[in-house]
Amino acid sequence: MYRLLIVDDEPEIRQGLRLKMDMDGLGVALAGEASNGMEALSLLENGDIEIVLTDMNMPLMGGVRFMEVCRERCPNVRVIVITGYEDFQYARAALRCQASEYLLKPVARDELNSVLKKVTAELNREREKAELEAKAQWELSQYYEEMKEQFILRLVRWESERESVTTDRARRYGLSGWDERPVRFMTLGFKVRDIEYAQDRTPDQFLLPLEKMCREKAWDAAGICEAFRDGHYPGLIHVVTVESVNWLTSFADHLRTEVKRLLGFELDCGIGQAVTGFNAWKDGYLSSLVAWNYADGSVLAESHPQSTDMTTTTADEIKVIERYLAKGEYDAFGQAVRPILRQAFKGSGASRVKIIFQLYLVLESAASDLFVTMESSEQLWMRPELAYSLDSVDKAYAFLAGIARKITQQRKEGADAADINLIESVRRYIDDHYASDLNLSTMAERFNYHPSYFSELFKKRVGRTFIGYLTDVRMAQAIRLLEDTQLSLWDISELTGFSNASYFSSKFKRIYGMSPSDYRER
């Protein structure tokens, strides 16, 4: 809908123009009327107006002077000149000021609507072009890539949101329809092998070049392939694609050849099983980690389909284990884990390792939340041979229980210290997921606290209410986007977790004393 201003010193002329226009059919709304150029300029400066119908012969400020000032102050406004004078001077002025059309009174209905249709069509084309340019800028921005990567990480870490929110974010990040198609994950990384490396040429020193090569190759396949990093595994890089295992194998083979040629190291690649649905992405991701552990200087793909893998850890079982760890209940942890391990060892070797990895990931996350240091001997992804050696229920349990004991002991060392660590974990989580649908109740549930106690504890430790701190983080990111990008307020509000642009704008003005648009233009 485009807003239109009528400028003429004769009220009956203005009324006649209003009646002749097919506003609904043209997608035009009347923004106001003015009897001279000065009134018109005032309305233009105080409102979003795209089209002006103006007379030429008016008091105070005539049409010629009005068009000159309008062109200077509002260069994007379309001006249609309507006059009763077939005068060369007016025609020349209209051309000089780049008027869109020049009409003589009396204006016929069909002629007026035809001109307006032409002008609105031009505006539509310009708007579409601007939207495409903005979209291109948006998609190329580093911020967009960071947010897309955070979204993928939430899906593979059991941190799902409401289905409608997940679907909408998938569309926003170019993953529309990926929940309905089989996808595969691939994990890539160097392993420390029993060979001697030159002091200045060890595999871990070439992680950044490897990451760049992976991202560039994934970028070449934009739309069907995405690369991402997971902070839990700093030495690994991951890829997710909707393409077939043959395509992914070819991707890996080409990358391994380039890595060997340019960096001089063997790259291990593990391709996970195909999974369908965002809720299953965590299983596909985990299976790629397992495959990478089994890979030995090659590309290894798990071949068994999603539907035949009967040995898995359910989300409810995971939540129970997380709750016991959060409360420091070591014995309860053991009672929950042993049955899972016994069931796992009834399946295949791959299924067994997958379950061990699932349980290990839960422990690793809990250790990270409490700042519990994991020894190198406890970091399963750094020691792929360890997965092979855990070949009995007792061995697997002893390995997992050793980590769990450190976590539960940390919990019991003192409620005060535990609370401090908890709040620090909450703050880190908010800093990483401020764009998500966060609220006090869901966060309290996530960290296994009663909402009332969680609210009081957060305010006591941080000095701000939960919602106050969340708003601070979101506003800091919003200011960054206002300063560094030309994204619309609608995009910024969505990317920073606000429900809509109107709420974001009113909240921003209440905090900073000016609108987001004024802040950007100051």
Image (cartoon, rainbow, N blue to C red):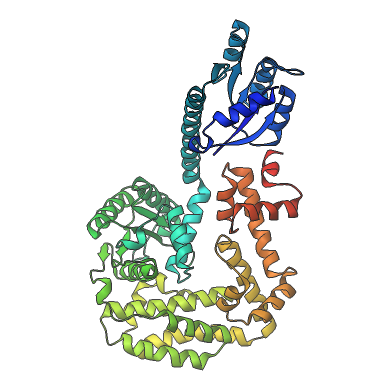
**Residue 414, relative to residue 181: is it above or below?**
below
Residue 132: where, in percent of width, then height?
A: 46, 39
Q: Nearer the viewer, residue 2 or 488?
A: 2
**Residue 450, relative to residue 197: is it above or below?**
below
The quadrant of the picture occupied by the N terminus is: top right
Q: Is residue 357 left or right of residue 245?
A: right
Q: Nearer the viewer, residue 460 or 468?
A: 468
Residue at image x 58%, y 41%?
A: 486
Q: Is residue 189 left or right of residue 514?
A: left
Residue at image x 43%, y 61%?
A: 167
**Residue 519, relative to residue 67: is it above or below?**
below
Residue 386: where, in percent of width, then height?
A: 36, 77
Q: Is residue 318 left or right of residue 143?
A: left
Does any portion of residue 104 appear in the rendered image?
yes
The quadrant of the picture occupied by the C terminus is: top right
Residue 233 falls in image quadrant: bottom left
Residue 77: where, in percent of width, then height?
A: 60, 28
**Residue 260, relative to residue 31: is it above or below?**
below
Residue 81: where, in percent of width, then height?
A: 59, 19
Q: Nearer the viewer, residue 202 or 433?
A: 433
Q: Nearer the viewer, residue 226 or 42?
A: 42
Q: Is residue 494 left or right of residue 302?
A: right
Residue 356 falls in image quadrant: bottom left
Residue at image x 35%, y 45%?
A: 220
Q: How many marks?
A: 0
